[in-house]
Amino acid sequence: MGLIEKFFKKDDDKSAGSADKEYDLRVATCAVMLEIANIDGNFSEAERKRIVSFLESNFGLSGEIASELIEKAGEKLESSIDLWGFTNRINENYKREEKIRLIEMIWEIVFTDDYMDKHEDYLMKKLGKLLRLSHQDIMEAKMKAKRKA
C-alpha cells in the first residue's frame, strides 16, 4: 500500500468505502489538472509546483503525498479513454461553487506559462461542458485566474 492510500485509510472512524470515495475524488480532480497541464505537450516544473500547491492547500496533503497523488492520477489518466469518468465523479461530489473554484485553479495552471494555446482553450471549453458549468461561470473563473497570474 502506497503512502497516499495509507493517508486516506488512516482514520479508523472512516468506513473503507468513504476513504475510497475520497481517494477516487482526489485522483479525479488531480487527473483533470494534469490533463490541462499536459495538453500543450509541455508539462513544466512550474505547472507541477502549482498543482502540488493546489493539492496541499485544498486537500490538506503534504508535498510528498501530493506528489504521489500526481503519479497515481497520471497512471489513471493514461489508462482512461476520456475525461468523462473523472468529471462525472467530480459532478457527483462537488457543489457548483466547488466546481467553479476547480475551474479557476485549472485556469491558473493554463496561465502558469503566460500563454494559452489552442489545445488548452479547447480543453477548457470541453471541461466547462463536462462539469456542467455555464459559459459565464467559465469566463468569470478565467478572469479571476488571469488577475492572479
Image (spheres, rainbow, N blue to C red):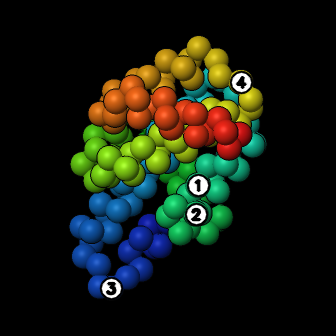
The residue to which callout 3 is attached is 12
What numbered label is drawn on residue 32?
none
Q: Nearer the viewer, residue 91 or 14?
A: 91
Residue 70 vertical position relative to residue 66 in the rendered view, above or below: above
Residue 71 vertical position relative to residue 16 in the rendered view, above or below: above
Residue 67: where, in percent of width, then height? 62, 57
Residue 99: where, in percent of width, then height? 39, 45
Which is nearer the N-term, disc 3 or disc 4? 3
Q: Quadrant of residue 22?
A: bottom left
The residue to which callout 1 is attached is 54
Q: Nearer the viewer, residue 33 or 8?
A: 33
User: Gap between marks 1 and 4, in whole Å?
Assistant: 20 Å
What numbered label is drawn on residue 115?
4
Foreground: disc 3 or disc 2:
2
Foreground: disc 3 or disc 4:
4
SS for dot 1: helix
SS for dot 2: helix
The amino acid at mark 1 is Phe
Residue 26: where, in percent of width, then height? 43, 55
Kindly identify the residue that appears in the image at 56 percent across and 58 percent down. 55
Can residue 98 be seen at all in this image of the molecule?
yes
**Are dots 3 and 4 in contact, CB under 8 Å?**
no
